[in-house]
Amino acid sequence: NYYRDVNRLLHAVQKNATKGDPRSVVKAIDNFCRQKEWAMNVGDEKGCILDSVVSEVNPVTVLELGTYCGYSTVRIASLLPPRAKIITLEFNPDYAKIARQVIAWAGLEDKIQVVEGPSGEWIPKMKEQFGVKTFDLVFLDHWKDRYLPDTKLLEDCGLLRKGTILLADNVICPGTPDYLEYVRNSPRYKSQYFKSHLEYTKAEDGLEKSVFLG
Ligand SMILES: CNc1ncnc2c1ncn2[C@@H]1O[C@H](/C=C/CNC(=O)c2cc(-c3ccc(F)cc3)cc(O)c2O)[C@@H](O)[C@H]1O
Ligand SMILES: [Mg+2]
């Protein structure tokens, strides 16, 4: 079952990665998913695009929707400046448990807050619970039919500011057609597609980077 798979992914990290070395954790997961069992991490190819966007934005406050095993959480957090933080939402307790251990192995607990629960409930509580004013960067990688409603919720909760960057995984495969249509046609966003491949495969996929214009 799924939980046993992600447990094997965690063991591969603990076996092959150096404790406290985030890049070796990322490498260990990519090797495991390429050689042993595919998993829905953003992966190394799209991960490089993610890295370049994070480095360019240099965010202080990041929101990730859909932690899964924490692969992209570790990738992002390893590039954040000292006081910067990432809040990552995950509603499956089994995945959250695995992610916390992957994050601990990378030694990035101080920069990452894993929040267990659904994005729809937690987004409206970001200000009161975590003292968040607005997010500098949002990484969307959860259920694909939730990208659009959660983006609208972020707007309505005043959590986006002029210049906030939304970066969305899987806009081609599995695809997020309603979200793409919205960010590409709304006057409130400037959108750009980064063509790539579905993690660990040759299938087309890509990331959509959208700047909120206020
Ligand atoms: C709706 N609100 C939510 N709030 C908090 N956490 C949420 C969540 N929705 C989903 N989650 C969590 O995010 C994760 C879900 C991710 C969904 N991702 C995908 O379906 C996905 C799927 C593929 C995929 C592509 C091709 C294929 F053949 C099979 C799979 C590739 C990807 O990169 C993906 O991201 C899980 O950990 C889930 O528990
Ligand atoms: Mg994904």
Image (cartoon, rainbow, N blue to C red):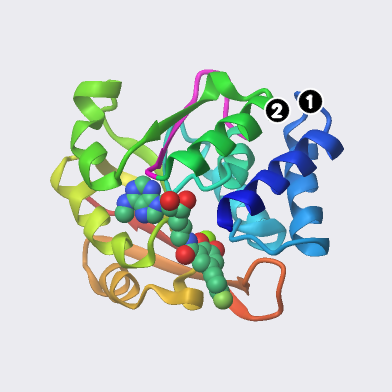
Q: Position of residue 91 (x, y in %)?
A: 37, 44
N-terminal label among 1 and 2: 1
Name the residue rendered at 27%, 63% in the picture. Answer: 148
Neighbour tally class for label 2: few under 14, some 14-19, many 20 plus, Cα within 10 Å: many
Q: Which residue is mark 1?
A: 19
Secondary structure type for disc 1? loop
Q: Position of residue 32 (x, y in %)?
A: 79, 54
Magenta residue check for 34:
no
Residue at the bottom extreme, as displayed: 203
Q: Classify residue 20 as left or right of residue 115.
A: right
Name the residue rendered at 44%, 39% in the picture. Answer: 93
Q: Classify residue 38 as left or right of residue 119.
A: right
Residue 163 in view in this figure:
yes
Q: Position of residue 64 (x, y in %)?
A: 43, 44
Q: How many marks?
A: 2
Nearer the observer, 211 or 37 = 37
Nearer the observer, 206 or 5 = 5
| Magenta region, residue range | 78-91
Q: Position of residue 188 (x, y in %)?
A: 22, 60
Q: Are marks 1 and 2 in contact (CB under 8 Å)?
A: yes
Name the residue rendered at 72%, 47% in the picture. Answer: 8
Neighbour tally class for label 1: few under 14, some 14-19, many 20 plus, Cα within 10 Å: some
Residue 165 in view in this figure:
no
Q: Which residue is mark 2?
A: 105
> Relative to 34, is 154 above or below?
above
